[in-house]
Image: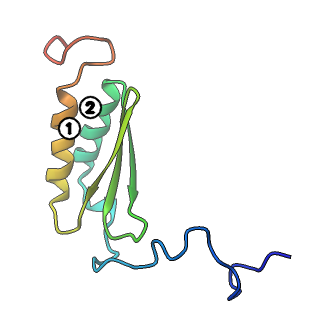
Amino acid sequence: MKPSKKSDEYKSVFGNRGTNRSSYPSSVDWCEATPQALSKLISTVTSRGGAVRFGYTRDGGAYALGLYYGSDNQTAYCRPTENLQDFLEEWVAFYENLPMSNGKSPDQG
C-alpha cells in the first residue's frame, strides 16, 4: 500500500522543489489591471491569431502571462514591484508589430 501524502514516509517525485516561498506578498490580483488594458491585450493578440493566458506564479507572488503565437509560446512574469499597466502595454506593442491573422501586415489592416 502506498503511503498517503500526509504520511512521513511519502516522498514526492519533486522533492522539496517549490516549497520555498518568495519574499513577495501573495497579494497580486489581475483585478489591478484596468479593463481597457486587458481588453486591448486580448484584442491585439487574438487579431493576430495568438492566444493569451492569465495566471500567477506557483507561490502567488507574481503575475504569469502566457503568450502564444503560431508554434511559439512564452510565459512572461510581472513582479508586484513592477507597473502592471506598463507590462501589459509592452506586450500590446510587441503584438502590434506582428502580422494580422489574415496575413496582412499591421499597416495594411
Residue at screen point 68% across, 88% down: 8
Q: Real-space Cα distance between discs 1 and 2?
A: 6 Å
Residue located beneath label 1 in the image:
92
Question: Where 70 sits versus 26, above or below?
Answer: above
Question: Where 93 sits versus 49, above or below?
Answer: below
Q: Which mark is residue 44?
A: 2
Instruction: Tell me the crowding category of disc 1: few under 14, some 14 to 19, or many 20 or more residues within 10 angstroms, Cα based.
Output: some
Q: Nearer the viewer, residue 49 or 59?
A: 59
x, y percent for residue 38: 28, 46
Q: Nearer the viewer, residue 88 or 1?
A: 1
Q: Type of residue at label 2?
A: Thr
x, y percent for residue 32: 26, 62
Would you say 54 lies left or right of 78 here? right
User: Are circles 1 and 2 on residues that touch, CB within 8 Å?
Assistant: yes
The furthest residue to the right: 1
Residue 106 picture quarter: top left
Q: Quadrant of the N terminus?
A: bottom right
- As helix, strand or loop, the secondary structure at mark 2 comes to helix
Q: Which mark is residue 20?
A: none
Would you say 73 lies left or right of 38 here? right
Q: Type of residue at label 1?
A: Val
Question: Where 106 sits versus 14, above or below?
Answer: above
x, y percent for residue 13: 61, 68
Which label's residue is closer to the chain start, 1 or 2?
Answer: 2
x, y percent for residue 4: 75, 79
- As helix, strand or loop, the secondary structure at mark 1 comes to helix
Question: Where 45 sits versus 81, above or below?
Answer: above
